[in-house]
Amino acid sequence: MAWSDGDDTSVRVTGLRRGRTYPATAARHLLNPLRRIVQPPGRIVGRMKIAPSDRVLEIGCGPGWFTPTLCAATPNGSVIAADLQHEMVTICRARTADAANVVVVRADAMALPFAPATFDAVLLVTVLGETSDPGRCLHEIARLLAPVGSVTVCETRRDSDFIPIARLTALASEAGLVLASRHGSRVEYTARFVRNDAPPR
C-alpha cells in the first residue's frame, strides 16, 4: 500500500457550513467526552461486526475518536486511519501511539491509494456528506472491499452534511452495495452495507 503525506491540491475548504470539510481547528469538539452519549465508540464499532484479524479502513478519522477502539477490536488485524488534513492526522497519531496495529495517513476519500479488495471493513462517521461526490466516494470504497467486506456509515441530523438513509441506500446501490443492517432512527443512524456480489456466508 502507498500513500502520501505531502502537499497536494485535494484539500477542500474547511468550515462548519454544509459542504465543507470539518476544520482541524475544531478537533477538540470531536473529542468531547459528552460525545459518548450519542456516538460511543464501542457501540459503533460493535455494529461493524469485525473480526479480530480484519483489515479495517477508517475514512475521515479526524482526531481519532473511534480509532483506538478499532485497534482494540482487531488485535490480529490492522487499521488504516485516513484523513485529508495534516493536523487531524497528527492528533490521531498521538492518540494511537501505543497501538501496534495502526497506521494513520493523509489521504483523499475520493482517490484512496490502496489496491482493490484490500479491506474487510470500512468506517465513515459523518464524513460522506463532506466529500465532493458521495456517490463516487462509495464507488471507491466498493473497489477496496474484500468479497465479504462491509462498509459502515454513521449519520446524525446534528451534522450539517447529514445524508438521509433513503438517499444513502440509493447511492450505495449505484455503487454495488446493499444494506445489510441498520440501527437508530431516521435522524441518527448506523447503516452497514455489503457488496451485492458477496458470496453467501
Image (cartoon, rainbow, N blue to C red):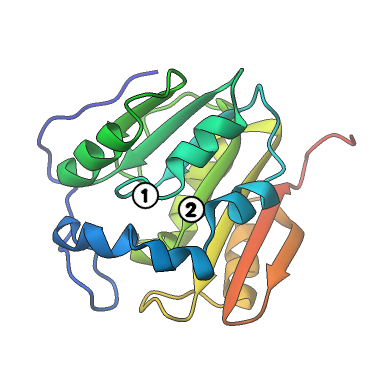
Label located before the other in sequence (2 or 1): 1
> Disc 1 residue type?
Gly
Residue lying furthest right in this view?
A: 200
User: In the rendered image, is residue 113 in sight?
Assistant: yes
Q: How far apart are marks 2 and 1 (CA)?
A: 7 Å
**Residue 200 pos. (x, y %):** 90, 36
> Disc 2 residue type?
Leu
The answer to whether 66 is drawn above or below residue 130 in the figure is above
**Residue 10 pos. (x, y %):** 19, 47
The answer to whether 50 is drawn above or below residue 124 in the figure is above
- Which residue is located at x 56 percent, y 78 percent? 164
Q: Quadrant of residue 3?
A: top left
Label for residue 91? none
The quarter of the rendered structure image containing the N terminus is top left
- Which residue is located at x 12 percent, y 30 percent? 6
Asked if the residues shown at circle 2 and circle 1 are in contact, with their CB atoms under 8 angstroms apart, the answer is yes
Q: In which quarter of the image is residue 178?
A: bottom right
Q: Mark 2 points at which residue?
A: 124
Q: Name the residue under label 1.
A: 60
The quarter of the rendered structure image containing the C terminus is top right
The local secondary structure at tag 1 comes to loop
39 with respect to 113 (left or right)? right
144 with respect to 13 (left or right)? right
Q: Residues within 10 Å of mark 2 (few under 14, many from 20)?
A: some
- The residue nearer to you, when weighing 136 against 147, is 147
Residue lying furthest left in this view?
A: 7
- Which residue is located at x 23 percent, y 46 percent? 88
Q: Residues within 10 Å of mark 1 (few under 14, many from 20)?
A: many
The local secondary structure at tag 2 comes to strand
Residue lying furthest front in this view?
A: 33
